[in-house]
């Protein structure tokens, strides 16, 4: 079983930055090494919208981003500590959403990001 816990959300002014963190842990019969071979990702759900991909960090270092955040957000991972991060710069009000961490079919509970002056 995979558990994910997000942190780092909050209120920020337009143009500001936030860094989200996600601790990934496993239990049961799943090998601890399996996370290092899995993609880890961030999704978000804006008010009144469907959940959408924000960024993915592949097991070999490759990354991909949603078109609305490309060039502003950066995803990274630490395979030793089983962490995945999302650095968000140049935040805009339309980035206001609940941000969820994702791995191997499991979701965290989400962390609220609000961009407002």
Image (cartoon, rainbow, N blue to C red):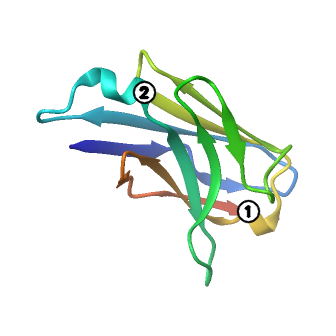
The quadrant in which residue 23 appears is top left
**Residue appearing at x 83%, y 45% in the figure:** 72
**Image position of 43 with respect to 104: above or below:** below
As helix, strand or loop, the secondary structure at mark 1 comes to helix
Residue 67: x and y, percent?
80, 57
Label 2: which residue? 37
**Residue appearing at x 38%, y 44% in the figure:** 5
**Image position of 33 with respect to 9: above or below:** above
As helix, strand or loop, the secondary structure at mark 2 comes to helix
Image check: 1 left or right of 78?
A: left
Image check: 3 left or right of 41?
A: left
Real-space CA distance between mark 1 and mark 2, rounded to the nearest whole angstrom: 29 Å
Label 1: which residue? 95
Q: Quadrant of the C terminus?
A: bottom right
**Image position of 68 with respect to 30: above or below:** below
Residue 84: x and y, percent?
52, 33
The quadrant in which residue 114 appears is bottom right
**Residue appearing at x 58%, y 77% in the figure:** 50
Q: Quadrant of the N terminus?
A: top left
């Amino acid at each position: 079983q995979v558990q994910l816990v997000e942190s780092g959300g909050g209120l920020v002014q337009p143009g500001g930055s936030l860094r989200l963190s996600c601790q990934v842990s496993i239990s049961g019969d799943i090998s601890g090494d399996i996370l290092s071979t899995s993609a880890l990702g961030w999704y978000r759900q804006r008010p009144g919208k469907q959940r959408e991909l924000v960024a993915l960090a592949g097991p070999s270092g490759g990354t991909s981003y949603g078109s609305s955040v490309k060039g502003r957000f950066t995803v990274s991972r630490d395979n030793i500590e089983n962490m995945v991060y999302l650095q968000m710069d140049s935040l805009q009000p339309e980035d206001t959403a609940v941000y969820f961490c994702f791995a191997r079919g499991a979701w965290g509970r989400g962390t609220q990001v609000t961009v407002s002056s």
